[in-house]
């Protein structure tokens, strides 16, 4: 790839961030419209959970496949295809005549969305070859993640209140079209030096595991935790996970290269992403129902009340990126763990008359943590890995985020559903305490895992894992043939 000017690199970063903006915002903008969707389409709490999780489960299932497909067929081509599908899915969601159609069209959105974030990160990694420039670009990228997910509830509330809930999907259309056109004009095509083979068996096992686990968690309160279908789905999910581990460890070109997880920081970043995004998604889901169904706020007022969350996330996400570049991952992760836990703990005693000042204080503290957590997750995912592995490594991090979001909504929603009828506000508030405790425990997991995975021992395991892939890349370049497996040192 020829050397590019700094201005063009910045333009490419902007284009990639446009895709991140609509995908990240879509993860949160729907939450504030859930009560309106329930009223118009007659949805239950589990139906609302599926409105969120149908998107995140499909997205999580296909992210790694999309990352490796982009490395094979071309990153720009895959990126543009994702933009077209995501934009089309958004249009279809805006005209959905019923809940089932909305869930189906959300899946179309997710197929397109899976081709955006990991592929865009791979494009950035290949365009910004200087390590310091790359670190700054990743900091900007992480900042946009925080901004997009932070402004989603505010934008969703404004659109739902003034136009209607269907308008929350219209906002994606002009941004998606503009990004697709700009990508065609300015983003260079790139591929991995050696194309990875497709792994349909591994892909099927991933989908089976995620779908089975999510379905069991969401439907268990309605069917009963002891119901045979719930146990069967849970066992299928566990069996799929075990089969995936065994199968992928024996493939030359695995869908998920399990050797990544020999790096303690990489494994830790995966767990942190699941915990942090599970906490954030559960927080938004629970808080939206509380503000509108219990406190009787309109969608617009509920969105505006969460504006401090958007502001704090937007401020601290880029700050976290700079801290990662200058001081490493440890400080941002510790701050994130402490503040996310504290913010959730502040809501474990929530009542129907809790002061708005107390709510906003909890929102601000929690949002500081969420803003701080994204940059170290992303930086760890691609740190030390050769550019030929950038698509897959970034996809694993993105997958972890979406898995966390799916499980967060499923677990928190099910905890509330198991404790109260959603239509009884008093019982809903009491039952929500269990959900806030779950969110607090997820924040605590960020703190504990973040502290453990930023030690000297953890860094040494990262260096050994990175060296393994660097050796493979060098061997592949010398031979000009398929990658030869090199025995790895054990952490």
Image: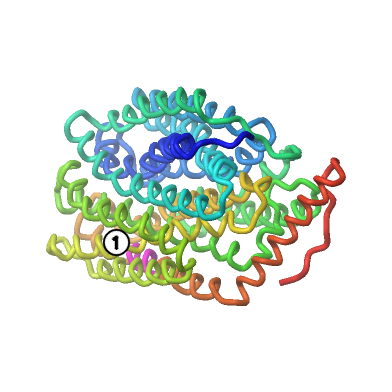
Identity of the residue drawn at 38% across and 32% down: 99
Q: On the image, numbered disc 1 is attached to which residue?
A: 432
- Is residue 223 something that shows in the picture? no
The image position of residue 468, as x and y in percent, is 75, 60
Please provide the residue range marked out in magenta: 434-440
197 versus 289 height, above or below: above
The quadrant the C terminus occupies is bottom right
Q: Residue 243 versus residue 265: which sits nearer the camera?
A: 265
The quadrant the N terminus occupies is top right
**Is 377 positioned to the left or the right of 27 in the image?**
right
Name the dominant secondary structure of the magenta segment.
helix
Residue 96 occupies quadrant: top left
The image position of residue 73, as x and y in percent, is 67, 30
The image position of residue 225, as x and y in percent, is 49, 59
Q: Is residue 171 magenta?
A: no
Q: Residue 155 versus residue 41: which sits nearer the camera?
A: 155
């Amino acid at each position: 790839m020829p050397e590019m000017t700094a201005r063009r690199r910045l333009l490419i970063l902007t284009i990639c961030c446009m895709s991140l903006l609509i995908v990240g915002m879509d993860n949160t903008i729907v939450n504030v419209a859930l009560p309106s969707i329930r009223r118009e389409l007659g949805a239950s709490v589990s139906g609302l959970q599926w409105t969120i999780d149908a998107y995140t489960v499909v997205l999580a299932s296909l992210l790694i496949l999309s990352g490796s497909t982009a490395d094979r067929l071309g990153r720009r081509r895959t990126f543009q295809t994702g933009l077209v599908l995501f934009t089309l899915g958004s249009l279809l969601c805006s005209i959905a005549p019923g809940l089932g159609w909305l869930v189906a069209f959300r899946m179309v959105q997710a197929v397109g969305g899976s081709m955006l974030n990991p592929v865009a990160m791979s494009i950035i990694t290949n365009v910004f070859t200087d390590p310091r420039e790359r670190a700054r670009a990743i900091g900007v990228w992480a900042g946009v993640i925080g901004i997009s997910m932070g402004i989603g509830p505010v934008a969703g509330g404004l659109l739902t209140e003034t136009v209607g809930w269907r308008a929350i999907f219209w906002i994606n259309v002009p941004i998606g079209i503009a990004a697709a056109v700009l990508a065609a004009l300015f983003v260079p095509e790139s591929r991995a030096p050696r194309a990875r083979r497709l792994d349909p068996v591994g892909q099927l096992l991933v989908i089976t595991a995620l779908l089975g686990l999510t379905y069991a968690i969401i439907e268990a309160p309605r069917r009963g935790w002891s119901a045979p279908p719930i146990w069967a789905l849970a066992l299928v999910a566990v069996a799929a996970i075990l089969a995936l581990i065994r199968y992928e460890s024996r493939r030359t070109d695995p869908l998920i290269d399990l050797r990544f997880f020999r790096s303690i920081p990489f494994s830790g970043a995966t767990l942190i992403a699941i915990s942090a995004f599970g906490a954030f998604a559960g927080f938004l889901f629970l808080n939206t129902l509380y503000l509108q169904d219990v406190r009787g706020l309109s969608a617009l007022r509920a969105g505006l009340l969460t504006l401090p969350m958007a502001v704090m996330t937007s401020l601290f996400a880029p700050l976290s990126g700079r801290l990662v570049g200058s001081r490493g991952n440890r400080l941002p992760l510790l701050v994130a763990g402490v503040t996310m836990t504290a913010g959730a703990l502040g809501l474990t005693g929530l009542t129907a008359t809790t002061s708005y000042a107390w709510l906003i204080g909890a929102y601000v503290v929690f949002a500081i943590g969420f803003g701080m957590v994204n940059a170290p997750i992303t930086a760890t995912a691609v740190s030390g890995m050769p550019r030929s592995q950038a698509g897959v490594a970034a996809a694993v991090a993105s997958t972890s985020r979406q898995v966390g979001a799916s499980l967060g909504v499923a677990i928190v929603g099910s905890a509330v559903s198991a404790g109260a009828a959603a239509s009884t506000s008093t019982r809903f508030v009491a039952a929500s305490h269990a959900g806030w405790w779950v969110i607090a425990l997820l924040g605590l997991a960020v703190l504990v895992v973040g502290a453990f995975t930023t030690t000297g021992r953890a860094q040494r395991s990262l260096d050994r894992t990175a060296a393994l892939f660097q050796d493979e890349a060098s061997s592949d370049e010398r031979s000009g043939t398929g990658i030869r497996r090199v025995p790895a040192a054990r952490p």
